[in-house]
Image (cartoon, rainbow, N blue to C red):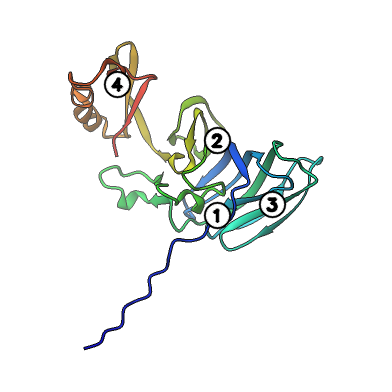
Amino acid sequence: MFGILPLLAGPAIRPPHQFDLKHVKFDVSVLYKTESLAGVVENTVITKAKNAVLNFDKGPMTIRSVRLPKSIKFTSKITKDHVVVTLKNVPAGKEVKVSIDYMVEPEAGLYFVPQNRAYPAMTDVAYTQGEMEDNRYWLPTYDFPDDKATTEGTFRVPKGFSVLSNGKLISKADTNTESIWKWKMDLPISTYLISFVAGRYTAVPDGNFKGKPIEIWTPTGLESWGKASGKNMLNHSFPNSCSEEWKTPPAPLKLLEP
C-alpha cells in the first residue's frame, strides 16, 4: 500500500547579516480598543560590510516611513518579511541609526486580553511573548538570537495603566489621557527577550532581600492574591543550595502576578 508523505519545508534561508545590532530604542502606543500598536523604532547598527544591506525582520504591518540621518544615502524597500535598507557610499564599521515608523495589528508576539476575558484580573491586559522569533510581529528589528543589543522602550498606555518591561524604570508620567512609562536595559540581550506587560496593576511591597526591595505586581483589586503568592517566594527561588551569587539579586525584584 502506498501513501503520500507531506513535503516538509526546510528552515527559512535568512539574508546575509551585514551589521551588528547595538541598540533598539522604541516608542509605542498600545491601543486596546483596536488591539493594535503604533510606534517608531530606532535600530542602531554597526555595518560589517561596505554599502551594507540592512535587513530588519517584520511580520504583517504597515510601514509608514523609513528614515536615516541626512548625511547617509540609502534606498529602502518593504518585502513580505523584511524592511530592507541598502546603504550607499558607507564603509564597514560605520554606526548607522535606522528609524522605522509603523502600525500593526499583531498576529503573534503581542497579545491583547480584554477585561471580560481576563478573569480573575478584570482588567484589559496586553503582553508579549517573543521567543523564539515572534517579536517581529510587533517590533520591526533584527529578530534572530545570534545578535544582542541594549534596549530602551517608551510605552504609552491609557491613563492609570502600568507597564513592566526590561531593565530599569527610567521614568513614568501622566498626561490628560495616557500614562507614559520608560524602561531601559543596559545589558545586551537577544531581541526575542524584549518584552512588556501592561494593564491595571498595583505594586505591592514585599520586603527586601539582601537590601534589594521586592515588589509584587498584581491586578488592581487582587492585592491579597499577590501577597499570598509571593509569601516565602525567596525561600523557593533561592534555596540554600544555591551559590551566594545566585541568591543575591543584582537589582530590585519586581514579580508579576498574572
> Could you tell me which secondary element the residue under label 2 belongs to?
strand
Question: What residue is disc 2 on?
Answer: 154
Q: Which residue is at 34% across, 20% downward?
A: 249
> Could you tell me which secondary element the residue under label 3 belongs to?
strand
For residue 193, what is the image quadrant? top left
Residue 70, x across and y down, in percent:
81, 41
The numbered mark, 1 or 3, whose residue comes first in the sequence reads 1
The numbered mark, 2 or 3, whose residue comes first in the sequence reads 3
Three-letter amino acid code at the position of disc 2: Thr
> Could you tell me which secondary element the residue under label 1 belongs to?
loop
Q: Nearer the viewer, mark 1 or mark 3?
A: 3
Q: Tag on residue 246?
A: 4
- Distance, label 4 to label 3, CA atoms, is 42 Å
Out of 167 and 22, give the one closest to the viewer.
Answer: 22
Question: What residue is disc 1 on?
Answer: 58
Residue at the bottom extreme, as displayed: 1
For residue 227, what is the image quadrant? top left
Indicate left or right for 19 with 8 as reference: right
Indicate left or right for 251 with 139 as reference: left
Out of 6 and 44, give the one closest to the viewer.
Answer: 6
The numbered mark, 4 or 3, whose residue comes first in the sequence reads 3
Q: Tag on residue 85?
A: 3
Q: Which residue is at 59% across, 46% downward?
A: 39
142 versus 241 height, above or below: below
Three-letter amino acid code at the position of disc 4: Trp
Q: Tag on residue 102?
A: none
Q: For the residue carrying disc 3, how many other residues have a C-alpha within 10 Å: few (<14), some (14-19), or many (20+)? A: many
For residue 209, what is the image quadrant? top left
Q: For the residue carrying disc 2, how many other residues have a C-alpha within 10 Å: few (<14), some (14-19), or many (20+)? A: many
